[in-house]
Image (cartoon, grey):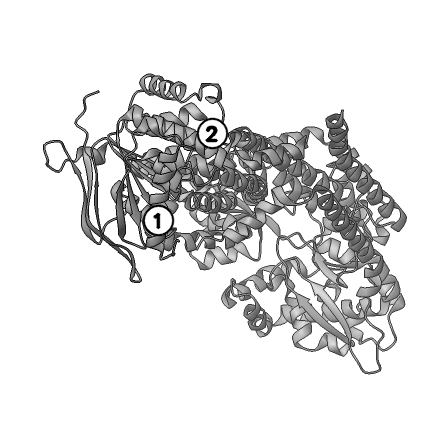
Amino acid sequence: MVPRSSLACIWSYFYGADQVKRFQLTFISLVAVIGVVVGCDRSSPTAAEPSAKQPGALTPITLQLNWVPEPEFGGMFAALQDGLYAAEGLAVDIRKGGAQVPCAQLAASGQVQFAVVSGEEVLTLRARGGAIVAVFATFQRNPTGFLLHKANPIDSLEALWRSSSTVGLDPGLPFVAILNERYGGTNLKLVPYSGALATFMVTPDYVQQCFITAEPVECKLRGIETKVLSVADVFNPYSAVISTSELFLKENRAVAEAFVRATTQGWIRYLATPEKYNPAIAALNPSMTLEAMNIAAELERPLITPASGAADIGQMTADRWRSLGKQLVDTKVIPACGEVDDAFLSRGQEAAHAPAHAPDGAAGKAP
Amino acid sequence: MIRDLPSLAFQGVSRIFPGGVHALKDVSFSIPAGGLTAVIGPSGCGKTTLLRIAAGLDRATSGSVNFIGPDGKTSARGRENLSVCFQDARLLPWRNVVANVALPLELSGVSRVERLARANQVITAAGLAPAQTRLPSQLSGGMRMRVALARTLVTSPDVLLLDEPCSAVDEFTRMQLDEEIRRVWQVSGATTMLITHSVSEAVWLADQIIVMNVGSVHEIHRVALPQQARDRTSTAFLLEVETVMRSLARAAGVVIA
Amino acid sequence: MMGAIKSIRVVVAPLLAVAFMLIAWQVAVMMSGVSAYLLPTPWAIGQTMWANSDRLIGGAIQTAMAATLGFAVAAVMGILVGSMIAAVPFLRRSLYPLATILQMVPLIAVAPLLVIWLGFGLQTAIAAAAVVALFPVLAATIDGQVSVDPGLREFFMLHGASGWTRWRKLDLPASIPIIVTGLRIAAGLAVIGAIVGEFVSGYGGPNAPLGIVIMTAMREARTDLVFAAVALSAAVGFALFGAVSCIGWFLVHRWHASGVTFMEQIK
């Protein structure tokens, strides 16, 4: 009954094992770990390169999401479902993510070809030496906000930040520093965002970060009345940004551009008829109902579609990146922000390199 | 010292272990009040089972072990006031000699001052005073046994059961321990049963020797020598040893010329 | 003289090994040119540690508190429940398999539930630490107490000791060497538990515990700060482990070989 042998094993580890041997073991394993990490870093960009394309064969591409499949990635799923990626010669594997997946690092180190990150993550990692580049920005307007119960008397970011509420937030979000600077926020109790609604549902004065298109919809369907305080007016980076490594972009520019074209087309199709694509997404994410996804798609349309029209979906401007960089430096999230022109792929650059056979709609207009 | 010591009567004791092994078959003998009876026999003859039944650590399948008072009636007192010394000393390794010796009193709720005084008295009498703060791991095998013997005395027992106390020590230490056993018996005056497999030890200590065959009593031998005349090298002693030896040989079925 | 030489060898050998390891690490990173956000050099980590010492020490104090209290809860619960399980054969048959399952429970999955049950803050980190630290104590207690010398148990029985007395005076002291081994393993696990607990329940701000410091640093891609915080949590674990080992040594070194062996190790 009692696992005496296992205890004996533990015992011998602490008492019996020869000390010198233990140090040797520790040392060897540490050297091995360092070796593996260093080895990975040097070899990974080439490893992540799509393998030499056979005539007629598709180029394998991995797209790492930073959350579970939801309408915020609708365009990518639509492109997959309608074969837009395949038409561009790409075999795209969409990998779901979660709170603990370091998407920016995965993209920068070439472990995956593309990863969805937030705008500030691109500049933050670049400031730390990561060679990451944004190629497509899903949200023109930041869909992040604070989710509150409708009965909560707090009605503005300022009121929230001057209150003593408990707020569930991913540690290290830059807009916290911005809000702290403006409103103090010394009485707030910041706790880690769980990614779920359980605590929120049972705690009337609890506040948590949300994606305007996700949690409020979920609450509404469950009969919980909520309100959202958007942070876009204070902090408005591009969001759900598809990024890749500088090395990949340099060596596989045509592939990246093809991927962006297909994704743009996917979004145009998704936003036109989201109900056509949502069942496939819902099948991958049992935690969100199809009904919620259809509502979310309606909510996200104005945040994704640029003023210039649907054809410009995904485009980014240097001005927006520059002002984001300035905000991050001002709030000491990063020590300095270099020139932002290398931080993202602008549609102008893309058009210059666009292959002649690109379909018209996909190439888009130069800004 | 006048005490109402009980005698110890084994009446038709049998013990069948689960699986059908007859460890004891109809064993009957009695130990007179204040006497020392040695039970001798080959390994596995059921000596220890007999002692465990007497101590109440095992049950007879049939028959009984009774403590009989001077009035001839069965008394419960003997069982309540018996001490056992096992062949392994059974000392608590984290307690020093004094605390180990005082343990039986501690378990029966005697106050700390009283039990330490009593323990010290017993330890001094046994000549263990210089070692009293040592731990069992710091003592030799013989010394540990002396501590265990001293511990049996601390409760002033009426009945003393000694289970091969010398089986794990060398011949030299055995002689010293035998002296100690005799002292313990004489000091306590208790009705004593000594399990042993040494004939000379039995002859040197006991006034009655039960020679056991496998599971049953082969012969009951009375040692005629007076206690003070038991010189291990005297002819009378050696003759006595020879007699018991022959009995043992007969029990074992070995032919002696 | 011999003793002095031995002591020097025992102290210097691990220090040399650590120094060599750090140098090898530094050189390997510098030569390979691996980016700092993937693997910073030990030197850079040291600088980060120095520059963020207020934040790291504050966090380490929080984490140490959670780990120590969680460890204490696990120690008391483990010894009491383990003793009960060891003492009652029915409980041993029925509860021990359940206790084994406790060990298999992934803390990551349970931690969010702990937040819902207990709320945010220290108490949840304590609970998480206690959950992971409980099993080794429980298993060691049961193992120690069922393997108490049956001869000694018989001796206590013979003198009419009650179950409670026997537990206090025999079962518990006899199993202390094995329980101490369980406690030493639990000490290391408690720190891991506390940090996982902090991942889901720790308060942010200037006094954020190490779990939150790690998450924040991760989000900001400050790998050097992640390593610095991890080094501090290892230090907290080592301190707790050392304290438990010393107490264990103090309790058993006079009569049990394990105490002597431990002394040999640290001498």
Q: Residues within 10 Å of mark 1 (few under 14, many from 20)?
A: some
Q: How far across and how far down the image is residue B156, in percent?
A: 28, 25
Q: Is residue A317 visible?
A: no
Q: CA distance from mark 1 to mark 2?
A: 33 Å
Q: Chain for mark 1?
A: B
Label 1 sits on residue: B246
Residue B146: quadrant of the picture: top left
Disc 1 to disc 2: CB gap under 8 Å: no
Q: Is residue A152 left or right of residue B64?
A: right
* Sequence order check, earlier mark of 1 and 2: 2
Instruction: Give the mark toward the camera: 1 or 2.
Output: 1
Query: In the image, is residue B95 above or below residue A165?
Result: above
Look at the image and tell me whether residue A167 can be seen.
yes
Q: Secondary structure at mark 2?
A: helix
Amino acid at circle 2: Met
**Dot 1 amino acid type:** Arg
Give coordinates of residue B73: x percent, y percent.
10, 36
Residue pointed to by mark 2: B143
Name the secondary structure under disc 1.
Answer: helix
Q: Residue at x 73, y 43 (%)?
A: A20
Image coords of residue A82 (percent x, y): 67, 77
**What is the count of numbered marks?**
2
Residue A242 position (above or below residue C81): below
Which numbered disc covers residue B197?
A: none
Q: Nearer the viewer, residue A288 or C245?
A: C245
Chain to which the residue tagged by mark 2 belongs: B
| Quarter of the rendering occupied by the N terminus of chain B | top left
Q: How packed is label 2: few (under 14 Cα within 10 Å), some, or many (20 or more)? A: some
Q: Is residue A37 left or right of residue A147?
A: right
